[in-house]
Image (cartoon, rainbow, N blue to C red):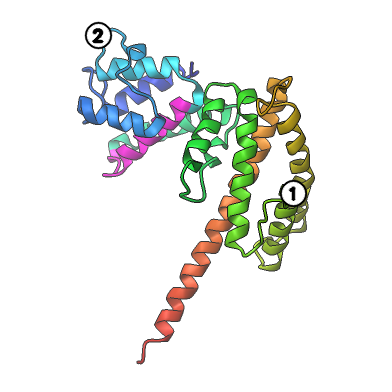
Amino acid sequence: MSDLSNIEKRSFERLFRMGDGYVLDFSNRTFEEFILDSTGKSIYDSTYNRAGGSKANRLRAFWSIEPNFIVAKLLGDLLQYVAEPGVKSEHKQLYDTCRRAVQRLLLSAPVPEIEAITPNTAEKGFDTLAKSVREAIEKNEPESGIDRLHTFTVKYMRVLCQKHGIKTDKDKPHHSLVGEYVKRLKMDGYIESEMTERILKSSISTLEAFNRVRNDQSFAHDNTILNYNESILIFNNVASAIKFLQSIETDESETVVKNESESSWDEIPF
């Protein structure tokens, strides 16, 4: 269950206009679709059927039952929905209070950066793999997701390497791929500090150890499974590294688009 305080709950109830059993301007259908898209959960499941089953009561049940990460994901998406037409001035302070509550829940999650575990290619099955990795954290069972996290990481890095023209032969060790990728980032000027370079390079030896964990301490084989705390540590380090790489790749893409745009203007004959 989430640890939303009573004060925070009342703030969300006021902002979402839940007093009469409704939630914002959602119909039953759009409410169900929104929550399914946000969290993958069916709000009209009997699990959330409390005190008459109104939309407001189902949302109250949701944040009483689900863990911090899932509740924060949904509430954050609802805040974004509220903000799309613009937050009224009289609701600005209330909106900010709710936004801080979402941030607090995210920071208290066992793996705050778990949303970074998203595919970087549309290849069939990759999205399903990423969801299964995130679900291990949503269920607070990181031990059960170590093998899939390893598979996701290998796939993710191979896609990045292919994007940068680095050969990804099947027999090429994962840590070798990462090493070549870090060198390419340094060469292209996307790493500015020596400390960042060292942190990324240290991840190479970490990934070698990750292979052993996957083979000897995960559900990939008939193993004795790694304990909860060390599994959380692995998840946090991998998710944090991937989030940083996502920021680098985003910056690079924006630079390419900007340069192409400037180039097209240069070609205009006047």
Q: Is residue 24 visible?
A: no
Picture residue at 68% right of the left edge, 58% below the top: 181
Disc 1: which residue: 175
Q: Is residue 91 left or right of residue 193?
A: left
Q: Is residue 235 visible?
A: yes
Magenta stretch: dominant secondary structure: helix
Count of numbered circles in the view: 2
Q: Along the line of sight, which residue is nearer the eye, 53 or 82?
A: 53
Where does the image place residue 265, in percent across and percent down from the top left?
Answer: 40, 82
Disc 2: which residue: 52
- The span picked out in magenta is 70-89
Whether residue 101 is situated above or below residue 185 in the rendered picture: above
Q: Secondary structure at mark 2?
A: loop
Q: Along the line of sight, which residue is nearer the eye, 90 or 100?
A: 100
Q: Is residue 123 left or right of residue 245?
A: left
Toward which corner of the image does residue 166 lie, by quadrant?
bottom right
Picture residue at 61% right of the left edge, 24% below the top: 144
